Image (tube, helix red, strand yellow):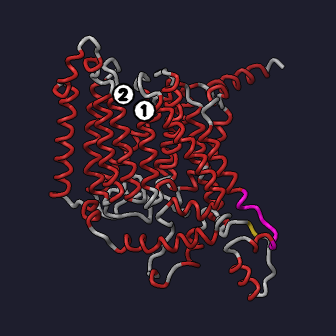
Amino acid sequence: MQGMKPSKRTLGTIAAKLTAPETRFYAFVAFFMIVFFTGGGSRDDIQSLLLLRPFTILFCAYALTVKATEQWKGRTYPLFIAGALLVLMILQLIPLPPSIWIAMPGRQIFADIANIAGIEQPWRPLTLSPSRTLNSLFSLAVPIAAMMLYLNLDREYRKRAVPLIVILCAISALWAILQIVGPARGPLYIYRITNFGTGVGLFANRNHQAVVLTAGIVMLGWYAASLKPRVKQATLKFYGSMATILVFVPLIFLTGSRAGLLLMVPALILALFFIYVGDYNADRFHRRDRPHRRKTNLFSRRGLILVISLVVITGIAVSSVLLSRSLAFDRLLDVNKVDELRLQLLPTLFAMLKDYFPWGSGFGSFEHVYKIYEPLNLLNLSYLNQAHNDWLQFLIEGGVSALLIAICAFLWFAFHLFRLAKNWRGSGQSKYRALMCAMVILFFLAASIGDYPLRVPSIMAIFAVLISVFNDSVRSVQRHDINQL
């Protein structure tokens, strides 16, 4: 028995280290590093998923093992939304009796094929593509793990979540620069199916890289403005953030993404807004004993930074259009076959939505189901793996259940925006953190109108964490406590 004591003591030491606040943060960092370098594509046949998904399950298990119950209170609603989607996908995979399955909308054609072939009707799950629905089920592990790992962070470490995402966005930007200056099909392109010759960074699709860069601009503007002069290396961090924004701008042009170009304008406006109202060099602006200086604050250091930033960003944008291969600007003015296809596809998407409502066709089944509806005039050598309108595809695949989950999510988001607006005055700088998160969330949702960024694991992880940060920030605003996060 005496020999057992050192072992118990050792196990206790290991358990203490695994549950330590810094260990939980290191796990959060490690998870995001793995997701960014292995989860930059939306396809289900990406080989790196063989590495990402087992690790994600392990991170989920770790997050539950070290779960800090007190810290989770009042912060789990986004996790419940993801859990509701998880349950819905599981239900779609449960086999149903033939009589029930055939009675569902859009299933009769499969029953007719089985009858013609003389095959007895088997028990089938609701989804028309069980393997793809199972893939969608596993893909949800990424945002769930991201949220749980974040919820376990102590207050001090939560402040580092957004800067970590910004750093990873900057790494993707640096990776894109190396891709642009290197060979068009060089080894820096991580994925087999990608936009070769453009700066896609750590992603497979240039649109997804561009959307993340625009989100990075907003986050950088907020981060630079959130620094107080007394913060260690505040000046270096502030001007480093500004310089990074100036790198992101031409890269968005060079990606050739129109979604990125359209979102870049409001992203820059928001970044400059945060810089102007932020804490960095804001003491003179906020002093009550010098109200007359408000009239001349445009010529203060704050105003000078704002004006110089506007001039430099405008100059870089103009130079990108005039002196470089500005693919995004050219594509914005040019309606090509892909754009025509997306417009022509809308009637087909609405027909699919009508035919499979209210139960849906099953998450991930769009590619297979679309072949039933594909018009003859749209047949070509390429194929459509996504609807390029994630709002409609979500409803086609999930039906009325997915619609109810989406309504619950949007009502929660709208309610939090209302709480933010109601408590805007006198709530300190935490309101800007909440606004930053809300705008980036809206950017991703807007990009989903013509694309599918939220089917990419790394973007899902960013989205999940920013929703959690948004929730914490609004709670902080409501309590008028800028140190809540």
Q: Residue at x 72, y 61 (%)?
A: 93
| Picture coordinates of residue 245, whole percent (x, y) | 29, 41
Q: Is residue 461 left or right of residue 167?
A: right
> What amino acid type should be assigned to the residue bearing mark 2?
Ser
Q: Is residue 375 left or right of residue 179?
A: right
Residue labelled with disc 1: 433
Q: Which mark is residue 451?
A: none
| Picture coordinates of residue 151, whole percent (x, y) | 58, 33
Residue 288 vertical placement versus 193 (above, below): above
Q: Quadrant of residue 365?
A: bottom right
Label 1 – label 2 distance at C-alpha: 8 Å
Residue labelled with disc 2: 226
Residue 173 lies in the magenta stretch: no
Give the farthest residue toward the top. 289
State the residue in front, 11 or 306: 306
Contact, CB < 8 Å: mark 1 with mark 2? yes
> Within 10 Å of the Cα at label 1, are there few (<14), some (14-19), or many (20+) other Cα atoms?
many
Residue range (magenta): 91-99
